[in-house]
Amino acid sequence: SVLSQIGNKTTIKLVLIIDALNQMDSTNRSHTLYWLPVELPTNIRVIVSTLEGDVLDALKRRKNQELVVGVLSRREQEEIVQHTLWQYRKKLDEQQLTSLLQKEVSLEFF
């Protein structure tokens, strides 16, 4: 695989992050993850996020290390938004913040 070739040519550590793996187009059996190497060189790590479904099932069959990340509390969500915006000297009023934080989602990382 390409990742194996890269890993074998260098000692530099590489972390590949793929978010929302479950949102990939499912044509050509991509959700079976046949395209994602099972074994990687020691200097390469892959971190993915997905929701429940066929992609998560495929990852669990591989017996990878799993970290379930639950929903953040309302206070944690507010702190992340406020801190991120403050870096740019911006802020939201209470109505804007409430509107932004209405949807709850939990992710699973491997």
Image (tube, grey):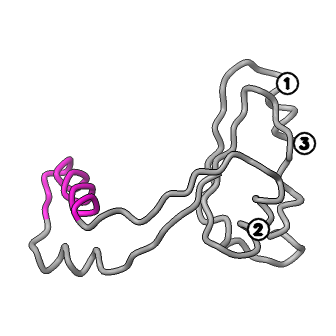
Question: Which residue is denoted by mark 2 in the rendering?
Answer: 57
Magenta segment boundaries in residue numbering: 75-91
Horizontal side of 59 relative to 68 (left or right) equals: right
Overall secondary structure of the magenta section: helix
In the foreground, 74 or 81: 74
The answer to which of marks 2 and 3 sits earlier in the sequence is 3
Residue placed under numbered mark 1 in the picture: 8
* Marks 2/3: CA–CA distance: 23 Å
Q: Quadrant of residue 46?
A: top right
| Residue 62 position (above or below residue 28) | above
What amino acid does circle 1 point to?
Asn
The kind of residue on which mark 2 rests is: Asp
Q: Nearer the viewer, mark 2 or mark 1?
A: 2
Q: Residue at x 27, y 58 (%)?
A: 76
Q: Magenta includes 83?
A: yes
Residue that numbered label 3 is attached to: 1
Which quadrant holds residue 33?
A: bottom right
